[in-house]
Amino acid sequence: MSVRLYILQRATAAVMAPLLLLHLAVIFYASSRGLSAADLLGRTRGSLTWGSIYTVLVLAAGTHAAIGIRVIASEWTPLRGAALESLTWACLLLLVVLGLTAVAAVVLA
Amino acid sequence: MSGALARQRRAPKARGHRRDPLWAAALLHRLSGLALAGFLPLHFLALALALKGELALDGFLKWTANPTVKLAEAALVFLLTLHVLGGIRILLVENLPAFGGQKQLAAAALVAASLAAIVFLLRAA
C-alpha cells in the first residue's frame, strides 16, 4: 500500500470511528423500539444533521472499504496493476453511488 | 541461484506468528471488514426502498422481524462492533506507541462485540 493510500485509510478510519459508534447507538435505539418506516422517515426526512452525518459516513466508508479490498486483493489474489486499480475504483463507485442514493432516499425523498 | 537462497526457498514457511493473539485479531479485523464491505451494498439498496414510498420500506422492515434475519443482524452488530473497536485499537497503537496492553485491548474488543450482539438480540426479541 502506498503512503497516500495508507494515510487515506487511517484518516477515513478516524473520521468513521465516532460516527459508527453513533450508528451503533441508532441501530440499538431503532431495533429495540421496533420503529416503522413512517417512524424512521419521520425522524430523517429533511434533517440536515442526519443527512450530513450519513453523507460523511458513506464517503468515508466507501473510501475505507475500497482501499481495504485493494490491500486484501493484492495480498490474497494474483490481481496486480490495472486490474487492481479497476477493482478499487469499482468498489469506491459502487459504495458511494449506492450509499448516497440511500441517504437521499431517507433524507430528501 | 546461490545455495543459501535455494535452501531458504525449500525451507517451510515460518508460521509461529499465527499463534500470537494479535495475529488472530488482525485476521478477524480483516475478515470482519471484508464481510461488512460485502453487506454495505445490500444495506444501501434496502434503505433506497424509501424512494418507492413508505410502504416498500415498511414491507422490508416487517421481513426483518423474522428470527433468522434477527440472528443475521446480531452477527452484523458483532462484526461492526469488532471492526470499529479493532480499528480504534490500531489507530491507538500506530499513533500512540507508548499505549500498552494491546492483547488485552484486542480481547476486550472481542468480548464487547459479543456482548453487543447478545444485547441486540435480547432487546430486539
Image (cartoon, rainbow, N blue to C red):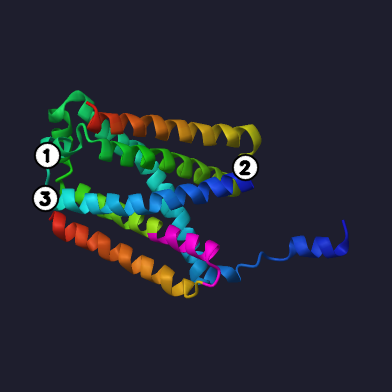
Q: Could you give the CA–CA distance between mark 2 and mark 1, rounded to whole angstroms?
A: 48 Å
Q: Amino acid at mark 1?
A: Asp
Mark 3 or 1, nearer chain start: 3
Q: Chain of mark 1?
A: A
Magenta-colored segment: predominant secondary structure: helix
**First to last magenta residue range:** B85-98
Element class at badge 3: helix
- Quarter placement of the C terminus of chain B: bottom left
In percent of width and height, residue B15 lies at 60, 67
**Is the residue marked by circle 1 packed among few (<14), some (14-19), or many (20+) residues within 10 Å?**
few
* Residue carrying label 2: A78
Q: What residue is rendered at 22% in x and 35% in y?
A: A47
Give the residue drawn at x 26%, y 65%: B115
The relative height of residue B4 versus residue A98 in the rendered view (above or below) is: below
Name the amino acid, label 3: Arg
Left or right of A36: which side holds B75?
right
Question: Residue A39 got which mark?
Answer: 1
Residue B63: image quadrant is: top left
Furthest residue toward right: B2
Disc 3 + disc 1, Cβ < 8 Å:
yes
Viewport quadrant of the N terminus of chain B: bottom right
Residue named by callout 3:
A33
- The chain ID associated with circle 2 is A
- Residue B50 percent across, percent down from the top left: 21, 29
Numbered disc 2: secondary structure: loop
Q: Which mark sits nearer the N-terminus, 2 or 1?
A: 1
Disc 2 residue type (three-letter): Pro
Q: Where in the figure is residue B29, as x and y percent of width and height? A: 45, 57
Q: Is residue B96 magenta?
A: yes
Q: Nearer the viewer, mark 2 or mark 1?
A: 1
